[in-house]
Image: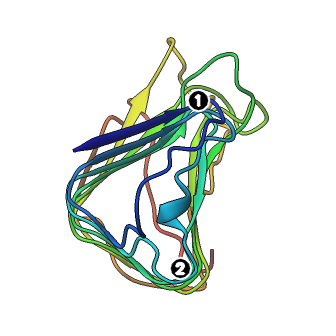
Amino acid sequence: GEGTDRNGSPLLLPGAIERNDADIRLVGVGASIPQLTDPVGNITLNTNMLQIISGATLTTNTDFTNSGNLFVGNADQTVPNPSVFTVAGDFATDFWIRMYMGGSVADGRYGRIDVAGTATLGGTLDFIFFNGYTPPRSESYDLITYTSQSGNFASGGGVPAGFDIFVDPET
């Protein structure tokens, strides 16, 4: 099945969602699906598609593993908030993360993943730039923050010519 929540309207589903094998899209500031962060059981595994976009936020109560497509970012020119995925424990990815970039850090039109524990990186990190946006060479984004890190992305794409992606173990 597919669940979409737009612009602050909670989508209520029966029971907690611990594993996502469907397409879940959180779109817009205030978008929520309470069953993703239920204290009894919250989302810990994504095997298909999880989108946190256009200023939406999602916070887990525990570790999270991405073995599917994870989209985080903001390309909506009317929303000056970053889309943020916060993981209260460890984060591991072995498939695909796509970051939507629609503006500068000051604009807030980008995505961020904040990890309270260890980030185990693998798979692909990809970027999609919207509305003709190309970051100035002086711009720096902390897209994934963590306490400690292991591994690295096997591949990446969508980076404008002249720019680099690097993992800073001090972040």
Classify 69 as above or below 29.
below
Q: Label 2 belongs to which residue? A: 169
Task: Identify which amino acid the numbered label 1 is placed on.
Answer: Pro
The quadrant in which the N terminus is found is top left
Which tag, 2 or 1, sits closer to the chain's start?
1
Disc 1 secondary structure class: loop
- The answer to which of 101 and 137 lies nearer the viewer is 101
Q: Nearer the viewer, residue 96 or 8?
A: 8
Q: Residue at x 68, y 32 (%)?
A: 104
Would residue 18 appear left or right of 122 to someone viewing this image? right
Residue found farthest to the right? 106
Q: Is residue 1 left or right of residue 109?
A: left
The location of residue 137, given as percent across then percent down, is: 61, 34
Q: Name the residue under label 1.
A: 135
Q: 90 or 43: which is nearer to us?
A: 43
**Residue 12 position (above or below residue 66):** above
**Residue at (63%, 27%) from the top-left corner?**
103
Circle on res. 35: none
Q: Can you name the residue that lies furthest to the top here?
A: 132
Give the residue at x 38% y 30%.
161
Q: Is residue 116 above or below residue 80?
A: below
Residue 166, x across and y down, in percent: 45, 61
Secondary element under disc 2, as helix, strand or loop, is: loop
Q: How crowded is mark 2: few (under 14 residues within 10 Å), some or many (20 or more)?
A: few
Q: Position of residue 162 (x, y in %)?
A: 43, 34
Residue 92 location in percent, x, y?
A: 35, 77
